[in-house]
Amino acid sequence: MSHSVVRRTYEIGIRMALGASRTGVVWLVLRDTLLMIASGMAVGIPAAIRDARYIQSQLFGLKPADAITLVFASLLMTTVAVLTGYLPAYRDSGVDPMAALRDE
């Protein structure tokens, strides 16, 4: 995500020069992050449930489709992914629009 935000510095600079707020720029990046999270969860959770049956012998004390474990892992991964999107977006939303435009 950090690399993606750095590649979009020119675009962010243009948006800031046209009057976009810092919050709007952060939400622009977070929207993309949340879309990636949702698509990853839509594919990953069913795959985890399907594959849990194959490794059931290695799951000590857990059912193959343990809901608490899936929810906890999903929340943890979501939190990490949102932070990896928010921190670079917040850093780059403070860029001076003229510096971003000159840099390109």
Image (cartoon, rainbow, N blue to C red):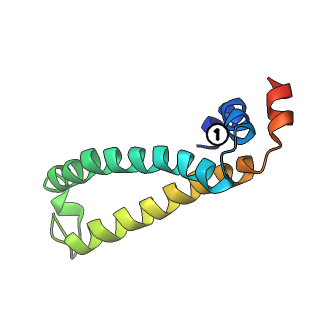
Residue found 66% across the figure and 52% down from its top: 21
Q: Is residue 82 left or right of residue 42?
A: right
- Look at the picture and state if 4 lies above or below 72: above
Can residue 87 be seen?
Answer: no
Residue found 71% across the figure and 35% down from its top: 9
Q: Across the whole image, how many numbered discs are drawn on residues?
A: 1
Work out whether residue 12 or residue 66 is closer to the camera in this orientation and state it. Answer: 12
In percent of width and height, residue 98 lies at 85, 34
In percent of width and height, residue 92 lies at 72, 46
Which residue lies under the disc numbered 1?
Answer: 5
Work out whether residue 89 or residue 14 is closer to the camera in this orientation and state it. Answer: 14
- Look at the picture and state if 47 lies above or below 63: above
The residue type indicated by label 1 comes to: Val
- Look at the picture and state if 21 lies above or below 78: above
Residue found 83% across the figure and 43% down from its top: 96
In percent of width and height, residue 43 lies at 26, 44
- Look at the picture and state if 53 lies above or below 15: below
Outermost residue, front side: 19
Quarter holding residue 12:
top right
Can residue 11 be seen?
Answer: yes
The quadrant of the picture occupied by the N terminus is: top right
Q: In this view, does 3 lie to the left or right of 71?
A: right
The quadrant of the picture occupied by the C terminus is: top right
Outermost residue, top side: 104
Work out whether residue 101 or residue 40 is closer to the camera in this orientation and state it. Answer: 101
Q: In this view, does 32 lie to the left or right of 73?
A: right
Q: Which secondary structure, mark 1?
A: helix
Residue found 23% across the figure and 62% down from its top: 58
Quarter holding residue 49:
bottom left
